[in-house]
Image: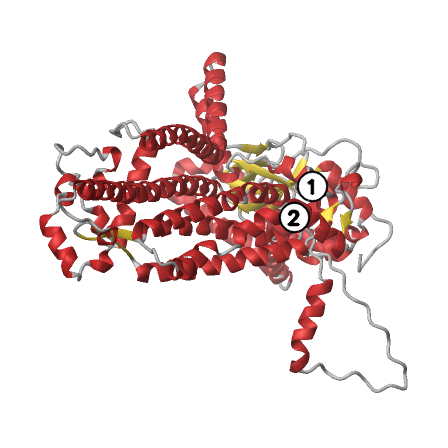
Amino acid sequence: MNSIIPSFRHLPSSSPPPRRPSTANAPTDFFLLWRYQIFDPDSDIVSYWNHVFLVICIMSLFIDPLYFFLPYVGGPACLRTDASMGVIITVFRSMADLLYLLNMLMKFRTAFVAPNSRVFGRGELVMDAREIAMRYLKSDFVIDLAAALPLPQFVIWIVIPTTRNSRADHANNTVALIVLLQYIPRLFQIFPLNQKIIKSTGVVARTAWAGAAYNLLLYVLASHVLGAIWYLCSITRQFSCWKMECARENASKLLACVPSFLDCNSLTKPERQYWVNVTNVLRNCDATNSLVDFKFGMFADAFTTNVASKNFIVKYLYCLWWGLRNLSSYGQNLETSIYIWENLFCIVICILGLILFALLIGNMQTSLQSMTVRIEEWRVKRRDTEEWMRHRQLPENLQERVRRFVQYKWLATRGVDEESILQSLPLDLRREIQRHLCISLVRRVPFFSQVDDQFLDAICERLVSSLSTEGTYIVREGDLVNEMLFIIRGQLESSTTNGGRSGFFNSIALRPGDFCGEELLTWALMPNSTSLPSSTRTVRALSEVEAFALQADDLQFFAHQFKRLQSKKLQHTFRYYSHQWRTWGACFIQAAWRRFKKRKMAKELITRESSFYYRSLSNPESYYIDDIEDEDENIERTSTDSPTNAQHLGATILASKFAANTRKGSNDQKVAVIDSSSNSLKMPKLFKPDEPDFSVDHEDG
């Protein structure tokens, strides 16, 4: 809100400090503030006041016709005015008048754009209070003043009580004339106010439902006004019949009918009570009797249903329903007499109903269609997709996957093209929005917990959303990797066969906070990287997945712009959370464990062999003789047991000597360790993931 604040001179250094203003000077300070305060027409306070004043205008348009419900039939052939209801209506009307006066003061302090400065851009604001006042006095001041004057209150509570001939019909006609005359400027205030709100904020109602309710409220307002006018015309028509019959009685000179008898203030007079018993006014002005000469026409319902003698709530609701019914049906159900003003009123109802009903349907349709326009666009797109799939004769499984993706994308975005909206905004605002949307999600990724806010801002600026349905392959093993995914919702399966090696398969689950495509980061950190890397894993969606993606060009930009990516600490963090490095590390540990087990087995075998050999060296002759004796005993036993075993005697002796020589020769030969690469214990080798070779170590980035 732009404002002009009066400047005060600085006090000299020798003067005492200024005192705090007392409460006695508060009115003076408020006057000074108001005198030098100028409001910007596009400021928040002016926009808020315009919306508030629009509601006040509509409420005042509802209040003014309530004066028409004050007269009612208070007895046989007499009218009365509801004084208590008149006080309540006057209080609300006076409050509305004060707010109209406040709006006039606001206009005296609201700047305007100079017409000759609108060549380019917004234009130049005129902040001079004198110029603002002169422009307002020449434009809208007269209409605003006519709308703010308390004319009905003045007539009801001052003019009518001071007049001598204050009959009920006279009060009705005067109040109706004043209200209808002042209703016109109050009604015309709404149209420029609507335009002013649309010019500053774009729309009157911010939501579609609010716009539909606003248009419906205007339609109900028109019905409210028509119902109030119909009720007052009905009372006037009844009073006209009474006056006509009184005039006939006075002309016949058979019975004196005094006009004051038609006012309920004379009910207690004896002469009126006598007149009621002998007069024909009640019989000839009975609306329920179709044989009377006086035709009530469209106003007969007010007396056949006794609405004219009911309380205020009953009268108001019935008249509102009457207005809604006839305004919606263009007055087709009305039965009129030949009374000229009655027919003119029916013509106005028909024309006004046709115009207002068309405007109501058009505006409400526009407001409600704005809510379903996205749904309709999605339906058209889905229908086009179905026709295209049938035309191309896609398999049923592919069609089902396409349908799931279209449905999931609609549920995630509601048909809103977020990229186009962001691209239409200024760069700084786009950065702030991207940071607000992505910063909390990016911080979920443990790898980014080691980087600073500047790096996170750069990441949020370049992240793009990625949606995947269940069963979708994000990347296959051997394909080129062109993006790095950071999972926000859902679950992925990452598996590898190490290039199709037989007997090798590794599978892990990626959950929110994990990432895939880390080969791209390694490729981006390479000093002389050229072609995109190949994927070492196959990544498939196990459920609906929402993720953010970083493209290859963006990762290269980060690698060259932010040297922190080249720090050892960040590289170790990356290796720790990288599932590719985890798989390699697990396989490396497993292979090392198997090598350790083989070495341990070989060592135990050597130890056992050595202990047996050293024991034989301690007494080699006896050991050899014992062996020969054992062999001779075996030969004798075998020869005596079975004559057929004699032919194997030579082979047995040779085998025994070969075993002894082998044990004796183990001391001179070095026992060979079992090869770790033997086929019996060999494990498929998993290659170590590539990593950049940095010449300079940056510990702190």
426 relative to 64 in the view: left or right = right
User: Residue 623: which quarter of the image?
Assistant: bottom right
User: Residue 222: which quarter of the image?
Assistant: top left
Q: Residue furthest left?
A: 277
Q: Residue 293, position in %: x, y?
A: 17, 32
**What amino acid type should be assigned to the residue bearing mark 2?**
Ile
Q: Residue 128, position in %: x, y?
A: 77, 55
Per the image, the residue denoted by label 1 is: 425
Give the answer, above or below, for where 615 lies relative to 302: below
SS of the residue at dot 1? loop
Per the image, the residue denoted by label 2 is: 433
* Whether label 2 touches label 1, CB < 8 Å: yes
Q: Residue furthest front?
A: 253
Q: Which mark is residue 335?
A: none
SS of the residue at dot 2? helix
Which quadrant holds the N terminus? bottom right
State the residue at coordinates (25%, 37%): 299
Give the answer, above or below, for where 106 lies relative to 380: below
- Mark 2 or mark 1, earlier in chain: 1
The answer, for residue 427, to whether it is visible in the render is yes
